[in-house]
Image (cartoon, rainbow, N blue to C red):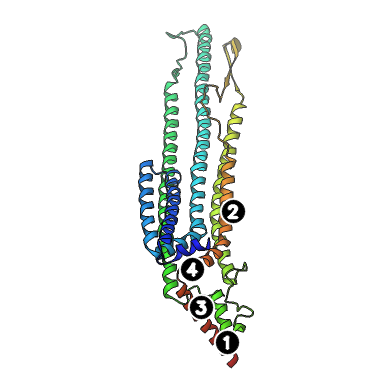
Amino acid sequence: MAELWSVYSKPVPADGWELRTLFLQCSCITVLLGGLFYNWLLASLEYPQHISVAMAVTFSLLLLLALFLVHPVRCAFSIAMPTLGTKQGRKLLLSTCIMIAVVNITPNIISNIKTLLQVILCISKNSSESLLNSTALLGNASWKLGDEIQNYAILKPMDGHFQFSLMKNSSLINQQVHLAGEKARKDFLAVEVLVKDCVRVGNKLVAAFSVLYLCFESAWYLKNYLTNLRFDNVYITKKLQHLAEDRGASHLLVGSPQHLIHPTGLRLSREELMLCLGQVLRFSVALLLVLVLVALEHLIFGVADTAVRRMAQLSSVPITLSIKYQAGIDILKIPVLVSDLNRSYHHSLTFSSARCGISPPTPPNPSVLLVVGLLFCIIYATVFLETYARRLCRKIAASFFESQEEERAQYLYSKLSQQHRGTLCG
């Protein structure tokens, strides 16, 4: 393995065997990343298959040429791998979490809101029809009352009955209720499509930005490593230890000054720990927003489920129309009762019907919450792993540019010597 890495990190292959080995290594890396890139475009970003194939093939060919021919590109690419697994990996995981939450939870919320609207529309339609049918009681009662009055009236009218106008056709009400429900359904469908489209576009933009920023960050790290001796030069490396031993100054490294770090140690410095805590707080805000969305999904499902069950339990409301009519005449100022009418008419108001097409509420999918929770656990783990990934980036750059690493060790040794002399003089 050490020999293969030596071939990979050399600026120029020494012989034909190393050249063939380097080409084989670059080809294997290109095929692996090309397949992952194709799957990412097709499955996660939802690009069409022909576009995914074309982009993956182009990416693979360009990557193969760059890795095989350009030594700094190999170094920058190798530095990008630990960053991809930590910092940029967190961004990709976070965008994946948001996409999973929005694509799976938002349609569920909209579906349960549709169920609530269906319940309201069903109750409105059935109650209006039942109330409209109940007006027939008034027509029947008025007709009976007219008959009774006609029997005892001295001057009889041509018809002798009360004229009570009824809307016997309920199609207009049904049409209005149906139009209102259809409009609400179209509005919610438009909102659902808009949300999904925005999530897809946003996910593609975030993915493109993450890839470009990953390349920029790797190139920026390599550029600073090669041009700035102070950049990320806080590690007690083997070259620094050998340099101090050769010059009889091992005491400079004894006790490990606070600003120096052992690259192979697990201890985090104070600055590294504070940086990790800041990242944890920032991602906790994103986690809180996702949890609010999950809580909203459970709340709306609970309301929709309760509304459907309560509607099925709604009982009919009895209505009783009582008419009491008395008619009499005065004979020599003595009242005489000639008619006494006392009748009751019964009807029932219904609020639900088996004819209502109400879709059952959709319960939250526990697997979505499990996947999102698992991804956030990985995100929190990568926060602390980022420190070790940064140390690995320095080690990778040192293996590609050994002469630069020796110069950096010399600079750090000179800096420690000056600090030590300043302490003794003070």
Asked whether the viewer can see residue 295, the reply is no
Closer to the N terminus: mark 4 or mark 1? 4
Compared with 318, 390 (above or below) is: below
Q: Amino acid at mark 1?
A: His
**Element type at marker 4?**
helix
Residue placed at 52% from the left, 39% from the top? 108
Give whichever of discs 1 and 3 has the lower sequence position: 3
For label 3, the crowd category at 10 Å Cα-Cα, with few meaning under 14, some 14 to 19 and many 20 or more, is many
Which of the 4 image quarters holds residue 264?
bottom right
Name the residue at 44% across, 9% down: 157
Residue 195, placed above or below residue 17: above
Q: Nearer the viewer, mark 1 or mark 2?
A: 1
Q: Which mark is residue 409?
A: 3
Tag 3's secondary structure? helix
Instruction: Indicate the amino acid at tag 3.
Output: Ala
Q: Residue at x 52, y 24 (%)?
A: 356
Whole-number angstrom distance, CA of label 1 to CA of label 3: 16 Å
| Mark 4 to mark 2 CA distance (whole Å) | 32 Å
Which badge, 1 or 2, comes first in the chain's sequence?
Answer: 2
Quadrant of the image occupied by residue 382: bottom right
Label 2 sits on residue: 377
Q: Residues within 10 Å of mark 1 (few under 14, many from 20)?
A: some
Residue at the far right in the pictured view: 255
Q: Nearer the viewer, residue 164 or 65?
A: 65
Badge 3 or badge 4: first in the primary sequence: 4
Label of residue 420 in the image: 1
Task: Classify residue 399 as left or right of residue 60.
Answer: right
Q: CA distance from mark 3 to mark 4?
A: 14 Å
Foreground pick, 54 / 210? 54
Which residue is denoted by mark 4 in the rendering?
A: 399
